[in-house]
Amino acid sequence: MPLLSLFDRSLLARSTRLALEFNGHAFTFGDIESRSNQLVQALRGRGLKCGDRLAFYLQNRVEVIDLWIAGVKLGLIVVPVNVLYRERELKHILADAEPVAVVTSSEMAGFIPDGIAVWDVDALAAEARVQLTERLAVVAVPDTPLALIYTSGTTGASKGAVLTQGNFAANGLTLTREWRFNEEDRYLATLPLFHVHGLANGIHCWLMSGCHMRLTERFEHARAAEWFEDYRPTVFFGVPAMFIRLLELPLETAQKIGARLRLAVSGSAPLPAEVHDKFRERYGSVILERYGMTETLMNVSNPYDGERRPGTVGLPLPHVRVKICDEAGEPVADGTSGELWVQGTNVCAGYWRRPDATAAAWKDGWFRTGDVGVRAPDGYITLQGRRSDLIISGGFNIYPREIEELILEQPGVREATVVGMADPVRGEVPVAYVVVDAAVFDEVATAARLRSQLASFKQPKAFVRLEALPRTALGKVQKRLLPPWRS
C-alpha cells in the first residue's frame, strides 16, 4: 500500500480532527495536509523534483513534519541530520549525500560547511504560506526511496542507509497494529525527529492512527512532570536515559502519570532490567522494550498483550524474519550466542554509493546486523552487544575510531583508543586512553577542539594517560587489558 494513502487515513479522512499541539499552537489534520501541499508548491518553485535529495538540520518543530510529508508527496529523498553534529560529521554527510540544499534555522546555519546551499526554514515557511493548498503528488511505489539516514560504521565513516516508502509503510502499519494505536490516544513526542525512533515510529504511528500528538522541541527532565500532568498522554516513546530521569519524579506524581499511560516504549539502547522493574513499581506501567536499527527500522518487540520480559527485546515482529548465526553464517541453537540476521520489508535498500558496504552487510537476502544476541526456547531474544566496538550513549551510536582519529590529530598525542564505560544515566560514555608527550599535550585545548568538531555525546568523559597501550603481537590494541576507569 502506498505510504501517502496510509497518511490519508488522517490527512483526508480525519481532516477536521485536532491532530497536533506545538508551542501553544494547535493544528487539525486538514491543516497539516494544507501546509504540506503549500510546501510542495514552494519546493517545486525552487526547482526540486522527484529523486532530489533535501537535507534538514533542525530541532523538533512543525516544519519538520511539513517537510517530511512534502517529501513523500514530491518523491524527494529526505536527509535528516542530527542537530548535535558539528563540522567533521556535517562535512562528511553533506559531501556524501550531495543534497540540493540544507533546510535549517538562522541559529544553526553557521555550522553548515561552506559551499553547501542553506535554506532558512522560516523564509521557506513564509514562502509556502502564500502558495496554493491544492495537492500535487507523484506516483510512488514501495521501492521509491524516501530517506537517506546516516549510521556510523566501524571504520568511523558514516554510511547512508537508503530507506524506501515501502520500508516506512511496513514499519508503521505493523507498529500501529501491534502496539494498539487508535485515534483516542494522546502521544507525547519528545524524541528528535532526525532519528528513526521519533520519525519512523512516532510520526508514522500518529499519522496512521489519527491520534493526538503534542510535540516538544526536546526532552527536558525539569519539565517532564509538568508535561505529563498537563497533557495526560496515553503513549510515550523514550530512550533509557529518559526513563532513568523519570524515576526521579515523586511517587505520587509517578502513580498519576502511570494510571493514564497505556504504552511506554523504550528503544535505541539497552534498557537495564533494574530500570524496567523500578518503573513498573513506581508507575504501575510496564515498559515495552523493542529492537531496531537505522537500516531496518523495527525488528523485534516485546508483546503488547503478553509478558514484557525485562532484559529482553521480545519476539520478531510479524513482517520480520530473524535468525541467529555463528561466524560461518549457520543458525545456532536456542541458548547459544550469535549474530542476529534479519529479513523483511523493513530492511533498507542498501547503503548510498557504497556497494562494498552493501555487499558485506547482506548475504543470501539476509541483513547482518552486527548485533550479538541469544534466543530463549520460547522465542524471546536478548541482546548481548556488538560484534564491533559500538558505544551506545543515551540512545546515540558512537563508534570509537571516529573519536580516536580526531584525538590522534591533536598536538602531543602519540597513541589513542576510546572505549565505552558504564554510566548510570546514559548507559555508556566514551573514555579516551592516550599516550602523550607531556610537554606538548594540552588536555584542556584538546577537549575544546573535540567539542568544536564532534557532537556533545561523543565527547570523551575523561582522558586517561598511559605509558603505553596494551597491544597484541600484531599491534592491535587489547582494550580488555586497559586499566579500569571510575568517574
Image: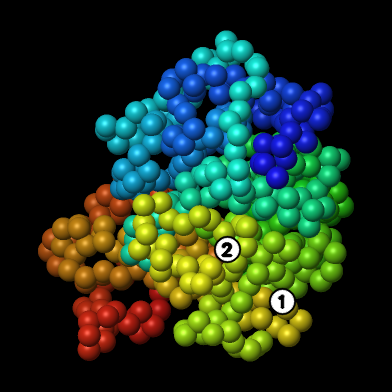
Front residue of 221/5: it is 5
Residue at the image position 44 percent from the left and 20 percent from the top? 46
Q: Which mark is residue 432?
A: none
Front residue of 229/75: it is 75
From the image, state whether disc 1 or disc 2 is nearer to you: 1
Residue lying farthest to the left in this orientation: 439
Q: Amino acid at mark 2?
A: Ala
In the picture of the structure, the residue carrying the numbered disc 2 is: 269
Is residue 213 depicted above or below 455 in this figure? above
Q: Residues within 10 Å of mark 2 (few under 14, many from 20)?
A: many
Q: Amino acid at mark 1?
A: Tyr
In the picture of the structure, the residue carrying the numbered disc 1 is: 380
Can residue 242 be seen in this snapshot? Answer: no
Front residue of 232/405: it is 405
Secondary element at image label 2: loop
Measured in 3D between alpha carbons, the distance from the residue under mark 1 to the one under mark 2, in whole angstroms, is 17 Å
Horizontal and vertical percent position of residue 480 = 39, 83
Residue at the image position 22 percent from the left and 89 percent from the top? 473
Can residue 445 be seen in this snapshot? Answer: yes
Residue lying farthest to the top in this orientation: 130
* Residue 335, quarter of picture: bottom right
